[in-house]
Image (cartoon, rainbow, N blue to C red):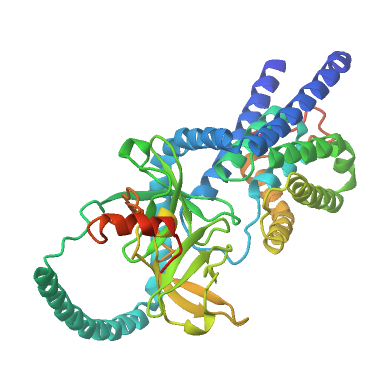
Amino acid sequence: MAEAQGAALWLGRATFVALGVAVIFFALLPLDTGVPRWAPPDLLLALCLAWSARRPDLVPALSIAAVALLADLLYQRPPGLFAALTLLGCTYLKSRARSLRDAGFWVEWATAAGVTLAIAVSYRAGLALVAVPQPPLGLFLVQAMTTVAAYPAVVVASRLFFGLRRSGASDPAGARPGA
Amino acid sequence: MARDRTTSEDYARPLKRLLLGLLVLCLIAVFLVWRVDSPRVERFRAQVVDTVVPSFDWAMAPVTATVNLARDFRSYQRIHEQNRELRRELQQMRSWKEAALQLEQENARLRDLNNLALDPQLTHVTGVVMADSGSPFRQSVLLNVGAHDGIVDGWAAMDGLGIVGRISGVGETVSRVILLTDSSSRIPAVIQPSGQRAMVVGDNSAAPLLDFVENAEAVRPGDRLVSSGDGGVFPPGFLIGQVAEDPQGRLRVRLAADYTRLEFLRVLRHHGTPVIEGPGALILPQDLAGAQAEVPGDG
């Protein structure tokens, strides 16, 4: 049984990394090269936060860091800063995962929204600290808000398509993805 | 089993903390190194893009094509309306074509009379757009041509009509084009009938700002804007767009290139404009030329 659990654990971890790469891939598709009027949600951040809050065992720090750094490099952002903030935010959610599970979805969503905003604010603060030109504030805030709005959708999609369920108290071993 | 888990967690927790701290430190170190020594990290970024994006390419092209197909299918719904519009446009185009043909013939005759040779150095490399920037804050596209095809940083990229942007970041097989709409793009330009010089300043909107205009009163919305070649940035004389005025009264540029669907881009090979230093000996006698060089700013 321990082996089966181990295999499912690694399958879940691999699924997370593959999902992250897929999100980056779809963002890079040259579908609309014009200037967007509004900022689409940062799905990668929402994905990292949702999986951290629901199944902390499937998102080790190393895979979050790797996926976020790859996104930094490919999205032409200053490399490292956003990845570090994503990692810190996810770690905070992971440490709160147990209490979030008992508190219900609204509290979880509010916490994720708080983390998203904190990441956005500290990202701008970090850029300002070393005097790097910043993205326009309005668009940036819109992106933070759309990311918060996309969070429930990411949770539902993860649950429907990848069987991501919280390891609840009634199920000590935790439901495995694909089970 | 429960006891096992707690004992293993006793060892695992400090280790995890340590790993986490190290990771965060590494990421922040990458950021600081990027800030201090940007070219090196940007070269690393170009290498990463060079390896990652072409490996996506087999999937990117079909997925993009499928999504575009679905979009085209949706536009079939208004096909009748479009058809009528196209007919009307075609009618107008025919008259323009007639005028253009006559002008072309006249041009050819005049060139022949002048014995004029067009710049033979200005050739181009055509590349396919593989990916865009993926972020709403950056306006750039990746082309599938790179250092292997002789692409050099700073060359101009255009679609069929107008300038789209400039090459910034060349990998072995890919190169990045910073579009004119990106907030870090600055291009020197000339406004056509009045001959005023200006800068086209990208600000992450569809119509870049027109800045540093010498005499804004002499510029009217609708004037043509072409690249000036100042500073050796671009070859001179390529169409950028038309001047427009926004509701706040600032001058902006309506770009000639179709930015919504960038598929194929031409990268212009440009080997720099030769700089003329001092008067030539043929124009002035030797002694006079020497005297002029001593008094700069005269005449």
Looking at the image, residue A135 sits to the left or right of residue B209; the answer is right
Looking at the image, residue B189 sits to the left or right of residue A48; the answer is left
Question: What is the count of numbered marks?
Answer: 0
Residue ID at (58%, 52%): B135
Residue A27, visible in the rendered structure? yes
* Vertical arrangement, residue B178 with respect to residue B38, above or below: below
Question: Residue B94 sits in which quadrant?
Answer: bottom left
Pick the quarter of the image with the N terminus of chain A: top right
* Vertical arrangement, residue A45 with respect to residue B86, above or below: above
Pick the quarter of the image with the C terminus of chain A: top right
Please name whichever residue, B265 or B180, is drawn nearer the observer in this view of the structure: B180
- Residue B204 in percent (x, y) is at 58, 62
- Residue B132 in percent (x, y) is at 49, 51
- Residue B163 in percent (x, y) is at 39, 62
Looking at the image, residue B243 sits to the left or right of residue A44; the answer is left
Please name whichever residue, B215 or B170, is drawn nearer the observer in this view of the structure: B215
Question: Residue B37 sits in which quadrant?
Answer: top right
- Residue A144 in percent (x, y) is at 73, 56
* Vertical arrangement, residue A19 with respect to residue B266, above or below: above
